[in-house]
Amino acid sequence: MPTQRQRRWVAFSTLLTREIRRFLRIWPQTLLPPAITMTLYFVIFGNLIGSRIGQMSGFNYIDYIAPGIIMMAVINNAYANVASSFFSAKFQNHIEELLIAPIPNYLILAGYVAGGAARGLLVGLIVTVVSLFFTALPVQHIFMTLSMVILSAIMFALGGFINAIYAKSFDEIAIIPTFILTPLTYLGGIFYSIDLLPEFWQQASLFNPILYMVNAFRYGFLGVSDIPVSFAFSIIILCIIGLTAFALYLLNKGTGIRH
């Protein structure tokens, strides 16, 4: 007779396996487009424009933006995977099977978030390999690099889950990435140092969580950051705790699921 812990592990691993198989099965839609898009970023911003910009914070421009481009791919794909997968479960009504099953809500959340993070990390690995064709990317602090990319994938997977809970149509799934996530990404210090900005915009940038992810991740590679790395970790961990608590609250309340 399996113990409760074993039953819960089976439930979690089944959800995670399903999520991974889902995006691997349609890899031409989930894994290939980010690789092509990020290759274009390296070609256009890294080689063509970067050769005219010169150095940024003491590094060649392509070296400076490479960590940010990798992080952009991670957060976009972690977010998109959970948002589309959980909303599809709602839309096709098979979320009801999970709700009536003896599975705690935190395991449902963990399964979807882990699946989204897995896609984000896999795409990040692919983009990292692509970047090696354009630059010899050094790694100064391996622990910081890995921990920040994992935390970032988890955070945006949680964001995708919350988006899917509130969404009532596939159009609403696209609203947050288009009007919020994309602007925050481009204003998150991927292509520039915030030291180049006027004082007001430097302070305004501090309200962008992506800025902390990009800078801490860049510090892991290059050893430079516009903000204290310990503060960046604190912000990301606090965001993850807050998003987890909010997602569980919505799930327990049945928001967007039970009618």
Image (cartoon, grey):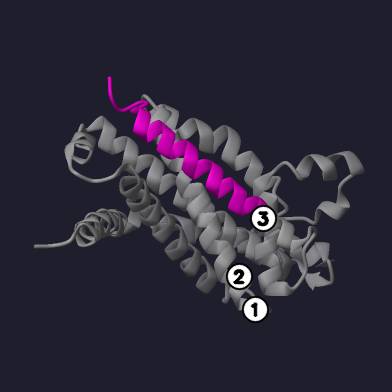
The tag earlier along the polypeptide, 2 or 1, is: 1
In this view, the mark in front (2 or 1): 2
Q: Residue 197, percent across and down?
A: 86, 47
Judged from the image, the secondary structure of the residue bearing numbered disc 2 is: helix
What's the residue at 50%, 30% (across, down)?
175
Can residue 118 be seen? yes
**Relative vertical location of residue 181 with respect to residue 21 in this rendering, above or below:** above
In the picture, measured across the screen, residue 127 lies left or right of residue 87, that is: right
Q: On the rendered image, what quadrant is the C terminus found in?
A: top left
10 Å neighbourhood of mark 3: few (<14), some, or many (≥20)?
few
Q: Which residue is mark 3?
A: 234
Q: Amino acid at mark 3?
A: Ser
Q: Which residue is mark 1?
A: 139
> What range of the chain is rendered magenta?
234-259
Q: Which residue is mark 2?
A: 145
Residue 252: which numbered mark, if any? Answer: none
Can residue 43 be seen? no
What's the residue at 33%, 35% (across, down)?
87
Judged from the image, the secondary structure of the residue bearing numbered disc 3 is: helix
Q: Disc 3 and disc 1: Cα gap in Å?
A: 22 Å
Q: Disc 3 and disc 2: Cα gap in Å?
A: 15 Å
Q: Amino acid at mark 1?
A: Val
Residue placed most toward the observer, 148 or 245: 245
Q: Are marks 2 and 1 in contact (CB under 8 Å)?
A: yes
Judged from the image, the secondary structure of the residue bearing numbered disc 1 is: loop
Q: Disc 2 and disc 1: Cα gap in Å?
A: 8 Å
Magenta span contains residue 86:
no
